Image (tube, grey):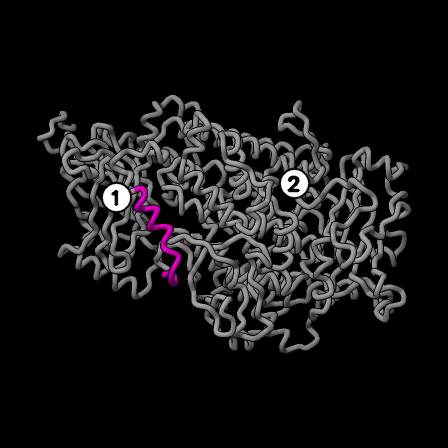
Amino acid sequence: MAMAKEIMGVSLIDRSSFLTKQNKFVVNPFALPLEKRRAVPLRKVVRGPVAAISEDLVKKALPPPVPSDKTEKLKVRAVVTVRNKSKEDFKDSIVKHLDAFTDKIGRNVVLQLVSTEIDPKTKAPKRSNEAGLRDWSKKSNVKAERVNYTAEFMVNSSFGVPGAITVSNNHQREFFLETITIEGFACGPVHFFCNSWVQSRKDHPGKRILFSNKPYLPSETPAGLRSLREKELREIRGDGKGARKLCDRIYDFDVYNDLGNPDRGIDFARPTLGGEKIPYPRRCRTGRPPTDTDMQAESRVEKPLPMYVPRDEQFEESKQDSFSAGRLKAVLHNLIPSLKASISADNHEFKGFSEIDNLYSEGVLLKLGLQDELLKKLPLPKVVSNMQQSNRGLIKYDTPKILSKDKFAWLRDDEFGRQAIAGINPVSIERLKVFPPVSKLDPEIYGPQESALKEEHILGYINGMTVQQALEENKLFIVDHHDAYLPFLDRINALDGRKAYATRSIFFLTPLGTLKPIAIELSLPLSGPTSRSKRVVTPAVDATTNWMWQLAKAHSCSNDAGVHQLVNHWLRTHAALEPFILAAHRHMSAMHPIFKLLDPHMRYTLEINALARQNLINADGVIESCFTPGRYAMEISAAAYKSFWRFDMENLPADLIRRGMAVPDPTQPHGLKLLIEDYPYATDGLLIWSALENWVRTYVNRYYPNSSLICNDRELQAWYSESVNVGHGDLCHESWWPTLANADDLVSILTTLIWLASAQHAALNFGQYPYGGYVPNRPPLMRRLIPDQNDPEYANFFADPQKYFLSALPGVLQTTKFMAVVDTLSTHSPDEEYLGERQQPSTWSGDAQIVEAFYEFSAEIRRIEKEIDRRNLDSGLRNRCGAGVLPYELLAPSSGPGVTCRGVPNSVSI
């Protein structure tokens, strides 16, 4: 056993600390204390096996390697870990048994080792004999999540080190290859971190190429691997022709021409996003045929049929299960109110706040839904009854966090201000530099640029200062959605059940460090040849103005919800990252060190974006149904891309400085000084940004000691060039794109991408249900304008302001649908991988120095989490601690599964 331990690199007992309860290798490196980890020789840590290997596989120790002699043969062994599907349908079961039978007669899985060296005689890479996986048929009924197989090879003692393996799958169905460990070479175990689906040769006749965990720059690629490296990239890029099959592993670009469905009618046609007319990032190409009525529009694939993404980008089973549960929840929460609405014509809006509360206390079925006899008429009665028996909570909504500490917090002005810097959209607020604020829209089209805000509107709320003093002392801040909405308002307000303004909200920074809203400007487009409809609402002085003020805040929040979802969340994280991910797969080999760095930060993003195109941002999808802009939602997103988005401003320090929320200050820890010291998103974010930047700099300096290596790295340069010139081709001519000529450039680009995929997305996503699940706090759409005394509706407002306020919010159906969706979007799946974690933490890279640096980065992330916890208990930080105040945990790195309002996953995966 001791000898077996030596061969494997670490003992089974040592390895157990890297296993989760489910035996998964999404590993928390802190299971092994830092001081103990450093006591272990680093070489041993790196050589730890890739997957859990059962005792019986290592009982028979292999003989020691034979001394080098070209005439001698070595017997070496591969231990191959395959992950089983946890659920199999009837067809899967039949094919599995067929594969088990045919495996016995030679139609099996065949491996071949490829050396890093060239054979001097043949001038081709040295290769081992081909060897089949043993005992596939014998283990076909093993129910474990992971099954280990072996294969044995005979190689010359002069074979060198294996750098690649080719795999031929002669079975009928694909299998998920997790890891391969080669034992028996003098260099010690060689690890292959695969995590990939291997297709049957009937679908993909070629051999799959898999590389070991040792990173190589293109110029340093061993001679034996060069042709395979290029071949693998050619196959991944494809030829840009034909429709993609679900089993393909091809990455390519296309425009967003699949959001509409013109074959259903003109109301479902949508413009193509991407191109000279409407610039937009590119998405993953599927190659589906055009629609019948518009040759430029791609035909739709409607749920539940899957959209194409490359096979390895599709959700793994545990993620798929949690997403399916969310979809089922959405069906329950949407279907039942739909039926209720069709039964009762007047059930379109909430009659009182208590009816909203009942969504959490009594549930949809009990309060808004149907009696038992009506449940029997549902298309899925068994599902509904099972849900009731197995988990009654699924038919109720969880109480959103905003209600957990103070049910009435949402009504308070200080909470309205706090959410601008510590809520779900803390990235829109800016320092007010000019008063009154000025629009950048063309005055010939949109009227005078000067706003309706006057000094007299705010003088009474700024502690005796003049407006000029307040500006100079950095006391005035603004959330300005005027220019985002105004060009679309005529069309939005013509939609049924939609009424919106273009809003500007002004805040004053109090001596306590909190924000106080002091004025909200509400603008409408031209109502006549030379005039514009504008009004300014200020804090209440009596009962009537209190309701006016509450309505104005609701309209401001509704504007903010749209910009948050369409611009800051979808565009700036999901859509803007997709081109970089596509180009990374197309141009950087799996053995490229930068690909290895980015790999965990690209997980699942293409899949979640495809699901969004299918269900969320499509014509008549969730976003159009639930948010104010309706069918013009994605055009608002595209307008922001053209006028606002800049990659060089997407890193946190640059964004804070651009918005005037910070000023450069080299004496400060992060090189800048925040103008609101207690700005939770920024203060926590800067800790994570610095940790990421230090980790990336360490990594980059390891592989690029001089600039010429960066300039001459053809894969790296091709990746960045295609990301910009194709993926973001509509803006590629802009002068603000960073160059990629030295280590500082590369560190900045990579840190920005990892920041966007991890912390920025987490800050914008996982608070959606905790803050938005109570619709009065943050209505996604509004259905009434604020009545003027001359309006016919003013009498109704005056007579029953609460009823008018509720009628302005989304109706029952819109609310329950929206809540079900944001509940799903705010949920962490059980297999989530958080910042500071990696699958196979000791073997993801064959570079011992980098593995150790990653452990140090992980330890720094844990220290940041403790600092965030400390801040949330500091009563001096009033924007995150106080009576009824929610702590700010959206950038706390770790989380359990579910809706937690915390946790920073590695990637945009929901």
Q: Quadrant of the N terminus?
A: top left
Tell me if I can see residue 884 in this picture. no
Q: Quick one: label 1, few (<14), some, or many (20+) residues within 10 Å?
A: many
Point out residue 329 in the picture as x, y percentages from the top left corner: 53, 62
Q: Quadrant of residue 882?
A: top right
Membership of 329 in magenta stretch: no
217, 880: nearer the viewer: 217
Residue 80 tag number: 1
Point out residue 863 in the picture as x, y percentages from the top left corner: 54, 30
The nearer-to-camera label among 2 and 1 is 1
- Residue 289 vertical placement versus 58 (above, below): below
The amino acid pointed to by label 1 is: Val
692, 767: nearer the viewer: 692
**Residue visible at 31% across and 42% down?**
229
616, 523: nearer the viewer: 523
Residue 503 tag number: none
Could you tell me how many numbered marks the image carries?
2
**Residue visible at 42% across and 62% down?**
287
- Mark found first going from the N terminus, 2 or 1: 1
Q: Is residue 215 left or right of residue 771?
A: left
Residue 887 tag number: 2
The amino acid pointed to by label 2 is: Pro
Q: Quick one: label 2, few (<14), some, or many (20+) residues within 10 Å?
A: many
Q: Are marks 2 and 1 in contact (CB under 8 Å)?
A: no
Point out residue 239 in the picture as x, y percentages from the top left corner: 36, 55
- Residue 285 vertical placement versus 15 (above, below): below
Q: Magenta segment range?
A: 229-245
SS of the residue under disc 2: loop
SS of the residue under disc 1: strand
Point out residue 892 in the picture as x, y percentages from the top left corner: 57, 38
Disc 2 to disc 1, how far (Cα)?
46 Å
